[in-house]
Amino acid sequence: MSDSNSPTDDLGTLADRAQGGDKHAMDDLLRLVYPRVLRICRSVLPYSADAEDAAQEALLNIATKINTYSGRSSFSTWVHSVAANSARSTYRKLKRSAQAAHNPDTMDKPDPRTTSVIAGTRLDLLEALETLERDRPQMVTPLVLRDVYGLSYEEIAREVGAPLGTVKSRIHDAREVVRPLLRPKD
């Protein structure tokens, strides 16, 4: 074992122990990743309470699905994917709720929990990702990991278990689909 203990090394070690059933390691792991998970969720969801809900869902997924972490990528890359998926899932739930709540016949005053998604600055991106997910779901994760979270192509290839050339192609194609959806409407 090396003398340098980087946070990534600590996460990997804790993840291995947590996968082995060590409850203390799981507690430490979740405590360590929480700030990162919350930051990822806040980058997508503009309303703090929504981001915190998404972060809690992500932590639950990390805890219950840690055995699906295969080690193909770094643990922090896997955490990025789980958090991003949780934020997008929370957005979809909020959007459905907002659409139901915005029935003019039943609306007295707007509910900030449901309107935060509509008022958010990332609405255009979330809508574009939703369109991409519906039409070409295999392209969403590579695009988000590259263009939203800035991971390298190599890290993304390891995370999604695809060859580097396939990942680059998917990201290129996804950008072609998403780009017109992000242009300002005249």
Image: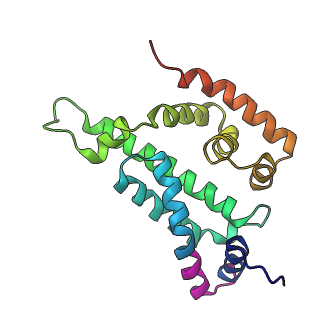
Identify the residue shown where x is 80% and y is 62%. Answer: 72
In the image, residue 103 lies at what x, y percent? 23, 32
Provide the residue span drawn in magenta.
Answer: 19-29
Residue 26 lies within the magenta run:
yes
Near-viewer residue (32 or 27): 32
Q: Which quadrant of the figure has residue 108?
A: top left
Horizontal side of residue 46 vs 22, given as left or right: left
Screen quadrant of the C terminus: top left
Q: Which quadrant of the figure has residue 26?
A: bottom right
Q: How is the image coloured?
A: rainbow
Judged from this view, the residue extending furthest toward the left is: 108
Horizontal side of residue 133 vs 56, given as left or right: right
In the image, residue 94 lies at what x, y percent? 37, 45
Horizontal side of residue 102 vs 17, given as left or right: left
Screen quadrant of the N terminus: bottom right
In the image, residue 71 lies at what x, y percent? 77, 67
In the image, residue 27 lies at what x, y percent? 54, 81
Identify the residue shown where x is 61% and y is 68%. Answer: 65
Residue 140 lies within the magenta run:
no
